[in-house]
Amino acid sequence: MKDKIVLGKTIDKWTKDYPLLEDLICTKEVFWTNPKYRKFDEAIKNISLSENHVKDAEERLQRFAPYIEKVFPETKDKQGIIESPIVEIPDMKDYLDAHCETNLLGNLLLKCDSHLAISGSIKARGGIYEVLKHAEDLAIDHSMLSKEDNYAILDSDKFREFFSQYSVAVGSTGNLGLSIGIMSAKLGFKVTVHMSADAKKWKKDLLRSKGVIVVEYESDYSKAVEEGRKQSDANPNSYFVDDENSINLFLGYAVAAYRLKKQLDELGVIVDRDHPLFVYLPCGVGGGPGGVAFGLKLAYKDNVHCFFAEPTHSPCMLIGLMTEEHDQVSVQDFGIDNITAADGLAVGRASGFVGKTLENLLSGDYTIDDDKLYVLLSALADTENIYLEPSALAGVGGIVDLFNTKAGQKYLRDSNLIDKMKNANHIAWATGGSMVPKEEMDKYYEKGIELSRE
Ligand SMILES: *Cc1c(COP(=O)(O)O)cnc(C)c1O
């Protein structure tokens, strides 16, 4: 293994250049802070996306709201806007406090994308947004729709017949497939979801019940994407949702930030120089957490500190950022197996687009063990009666690691935040869970209880 060559260098040399790789290769938990982190005003100069792009996405979602409200009645109370609650989780914070060595300072909140309408995960942001954007582009190009129309007219046989001439395809570990599949099928598109081996059976069954074509692969996410893209590219009327490079997905996710700001204002949560905000985002390929983090940096600049969370067996974004090789390396290159219970995060190669966009904006990235995800899952259920899928718990461990690791403490010192931490707010981004069938969730919960007895 040590002699294996990756991008012209032996693994031995790689670990000499980046000592943290040693722990990553042994699938030990790590907390990495980003040496390329910069002040917002400086960092944003190198990024071609701006607040205007995010506002454009927000307006598009607003145009679609009357349609969404009509075809997904569960969105009625929010007038067709797909948004999740944010809640304080003080009992969970007490639990974490009791189970770690140091004092966890500040207030802990949970952003419940686990309970987003329609598809029950963070993918209900970017995934649905991208399908809507594609539908709007097609309808406007064919002079069937103008931006001034009430988009409720899309709920008609005329539009469904129109969209049925077109196909949408995507490769997915599960949740992106759910979002793209459900939304595309509702509009009338022919839709194919290419599912990786990690994808849960209930997700495939649910999609098939909605008329979605599900193609299964025995290999991982990258293969499902590659095959999906190949098949889609062969058909000129087919649109491939490219999770690894899509700016539209990214912008759909980014909209979350401005809405969150409004929610925090309403809760009286202050974010400023003396009240830092820490956000912990579970990361797979990077689009979801990357888009949200980008939006948060636009909204709060240097007062928000964003950390990604990855399974110890799939630290693709961390390796990509640290080596600055982004999508040119995979976890498998370093002998890491990409096998994890966090199916939404089971990605071996990160998005190069996201890594490069965030390379000066992201504060850091930490890894978390699968067993810990289960323990946190049952603890959150017991303390707050909130049920998440394993992937989503990755963010909940962040506050502990920030205070409990040398690298975390160093980050706070270097950023002059030590005396401000008592005023801090921490948000764990709960990325999925409400659609998990009860029997599955019971098994997760039991597993967590069992592991916490050990
Ligand atoms: C997809 C997903 C993520 C991460 O999103 P990426 O865009 O793949 O980084 C996190 N949690 C859950 C539950 C997901 O489904």
Image (tube, grey):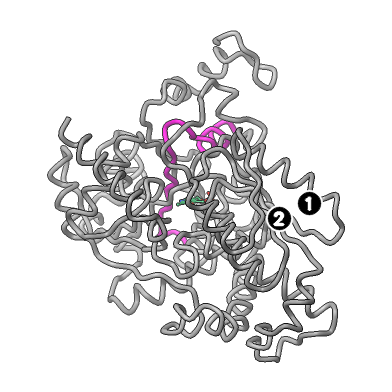
> Is residue 346 a member of the stretch shown in magenta?
no
Badge 2 crowding class, 10 Å Cα cut-off, few under 14, some 14 to 19, many 20 or more, is: many
> Is residue 305 a member of the stretch shown in magenta?
yes
Residue bearing the label numbered 1:
232
- The picture places residue 99, in percent across and down from the top left corner, at 16, 41
- The picture places residue 348, in percent across and down from the top left corner, at 56, 34
Residue in the picture at 76% in, 85% down: 145
Q: Which residue is at the front of the view, 322 or 136?
A: 136
Secondary structure under the numbered disc 2 in the rendered image: strand
Asked where in the image residue 320 lies, by quadrant, the reply is: top right
Residue bearing the label numbered 2:
169
* Amino acid on which the number 1 mark rests in the picture: Ser
Residue in the picture at 57% in, 45% down: 285
Magenta stretch bounds: 301-323
* Amino acid on which the number 2 mark rests in the picture: Ala
Q: Which residue is at the front of the view, 339 or 276?
A: 339
Secondary structure under the numbered disc 1 in the rendered image: helix
Residue in the picture at 47% in, 40% down: 34
Q: Which residue is at the front of the view, 411 or 319?
A: 319
Q: Is residue 48 left or right of residue 42?
A: right
Asked where in the image residue 222 lies, by quadrant, the reply is: top right
CA separation in Å, label 1 and label 2: 6 Å
Q: Are marks 1 and 2 in contact (CB under 8 Å)?
A: yes
Seen as rendered, the residue at the extreme front is 209
Badge 1 crowding class, 10 Å Cα cut-off, few under 14, some 14 to 19, many 20 or more, is: many
Q: Earlier in the sequence, mark 1 or mark 2?
A: 2
